[in-house]
C-alpha cells in the first residue's frame, strides 16, 4: 500500500513539474511579445492556432508533427486533447465507461459548472439496456443511478423511463428518437463542450474566431448574390458558412471600385456611366482609343 502511495505521489510530482514547465514557457512567450521580433512572435502564434484547430478536428498526428517541428510542444495542449480523444472514441464505439470515469475524475469541477454530462451518460446507458431487452437490469440501474437526479431532472427521467413501455420498435417519434444513433453523436458534442469549459478553452476553434473577425469587415448583401466576384472570400461556401451568424459590415461611406482596374474611384479617378448603365473609372476610358464594356 505504501509503495502504491509512493508511486502516485511521484506521478503527481511529475505532472506538476510538467505543468510548471508549460506555464513558464507560456509566460516567456507572452513576455517576448514586447521584445521587438513581431514576425517571429506572430508566426508562432499562427502555428498555435493551427495546432488548436487540428486537435479539435481530430487531426492528432498532423497537429503533433507541426508542434514538434515548430518546437512549440509546451505552448499547446496535445496531451489534454489525447486524453479527450480516448473518451470521444469510446463514445463513438458506444462505450460509456471511459466517459463516466472522466466525469468521476473531474467531479468537483463539473459540479461547479452545473454540468449534466454524467446524467446524460446515465440516461444513454439506461436506454441501451432497454434496447437490449434487459428490462429488470434497466429498472435496477434506474433505481441506483437515475433516481438521485429526480429532484432536478424529473421530466427527462419520466420521458426516458417510458421507454420500458415504448421500446425501440415504437412508431411514437417522441420515444423512437431516444434509440437513434444521433443520440451518441449528441453525447460526443456534449462531452466536447464540457471538456472545453473545463480547461478554459473557447467553444469555437480559435481559427474560426479570427476568420470571423475578418469576415465581419467584408460581409455585405452583394457577397451573397450570384455575381459575387471570385476575389471575394465570401464567394466560397466555407467562408459563407462561417459568416452566416455575423452582421453585415457597417459602411458609413460607399466606396466604388472599378471592375477593370480594381482601383478605387474617387475625385482623382472619377466614375463614368456608360450608355448601358454600367460604371467604370476614368482611367479605363482614358487608356484605349475605343472601349467596349465587358458586361455587354
Image (tube, rainbow, N blue to C red):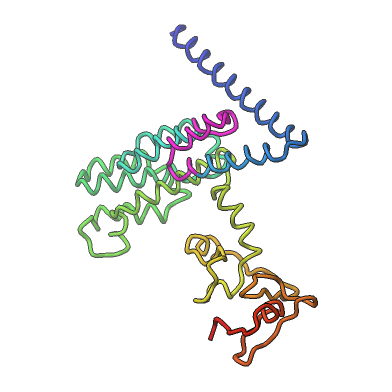
Q: Residue furthest bottom?
A: 275
The quarter of the displayed image where residue 3 is located = top left
Q: What residue is shown at x 60% (from left), y 42% (from top)? A: 46
Location of the N terminus (image quadrant)? top left
Is residue 61 in the magenta section? yes
Q: Which residues are magenta?
A: 54-79
The quarter of the displayed image where residue 168 is located = bottom left
For the residue pair 174 and 193, the one nearer the viewer reads as 193
The percent position of residue 25, horizontal first and vertical second, equals: 65, 27
Above or below, 49 against 27 in this view is: below
The percent position of residue 129, horizontal first and vertical second, equals: 25, 44
The percent position of residue 195, horizontal first and vertical second, equals: 50, 41
Is residue 192 in the magenta section? no
The percent position of residue 164, horizontal first and vertical second, equals: 25, 52
For the residue pair 174 and 273, the one nearer the viewer reads as 273
Above or below, 11 against 136 in this view is: above
Q: What residue is shown at x 72% (from left), y 80% (from top)? A: 282
For the stretch drawn in magenta, the main secondary structure is: helix
Q: What residue is shown at x 50% (from left), y 46% (from top)? A: 193
Q: What residue is shown at x 68% (from left), y 81% (from top)? A: 285
Amino acid at each position: 500500500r505504501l509503495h502504491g502511495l509512493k508511486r502516485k505521489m511521484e506521478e503527481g510530482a511529475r505532472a506538476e513539474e510538467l505543468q510548471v514547465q508549460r506555464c513558464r514557457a507560456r509566460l516567456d512567450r507572452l513576455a517576448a511579445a514586447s521584445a521587438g521580433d513581431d514576425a517571429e512572435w506572430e508566426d508562432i502564434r499562427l502555428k498555435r492556432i493551427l495546432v488548436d484547430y487540428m486537435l479539435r478536428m481530430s487531426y492528432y498526428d498532423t497537429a503533433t508533427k507541426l508542434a514538434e517541428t515548430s518546437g512549440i510542444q509546451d505552448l499547446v495542449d496535445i496531451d489534454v486533447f489525447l486524453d479527450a480523444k480516448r473518451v470521444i472514441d469510446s463514445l463513438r464505439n458506444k462505450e460509456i465507461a471511459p466517459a463516466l470515469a472522466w466525469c468521476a475524475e473531474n467531479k468537483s469541477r463539473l459540479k461547479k459548472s452545473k454540468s449534466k454530462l454524467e446524467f446524460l451518460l446515465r440516461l444513454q446507458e439506461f436506454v441501451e439496456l432497454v434496447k437490449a431487452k434487459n428490462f429488470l437490469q434497466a429498472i435496477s440501474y434506474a433505481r441506483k443511478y437515475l433516481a438521485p437526479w429526480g429532484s432536478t431532472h424529473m421530466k427527462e427521467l419520466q420521458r426516458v423511463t417510458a421507454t420500458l413501455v415504448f421500446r425501440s420498435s415504437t412508431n411514437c417519434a417522441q420515444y423512437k428518437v431516444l434509440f437513434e444513433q444521433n443520440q451518441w453523436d449528441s453525447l460526443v458534442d456534449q462531452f466536447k463542450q464540457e471538456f472545453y469549459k473545463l480547461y478554459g478553452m473557447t467553444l469555437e476553434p480559435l481559427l474560426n474566431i479570427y476568420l470571423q473577425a475578418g469576415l465581419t469587415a467584408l460581409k455585405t448583401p452583394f457577397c451573397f448574390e450570384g455575381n459575387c466576384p471570385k476575389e471575394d472570400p465570401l464567394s466560397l461556401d466555407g467562408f459563407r458558412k462561417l459568416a452566416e451568424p455575423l452582421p453585415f459590415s457597417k459602411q458609413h461611406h460607399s466606396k466604388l471600385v472599378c471592375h477593370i482596374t480594381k482601383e478605387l474611384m474617387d475625385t482623382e479617378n472619377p466614375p463614368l456611366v456608360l450608355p448601358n448603365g454600367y460604371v467604370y473609372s476614368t482611367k479605363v476610358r482614358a487608356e484605349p482609343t475605343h472601349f467596349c464594356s465587358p458586361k455587354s
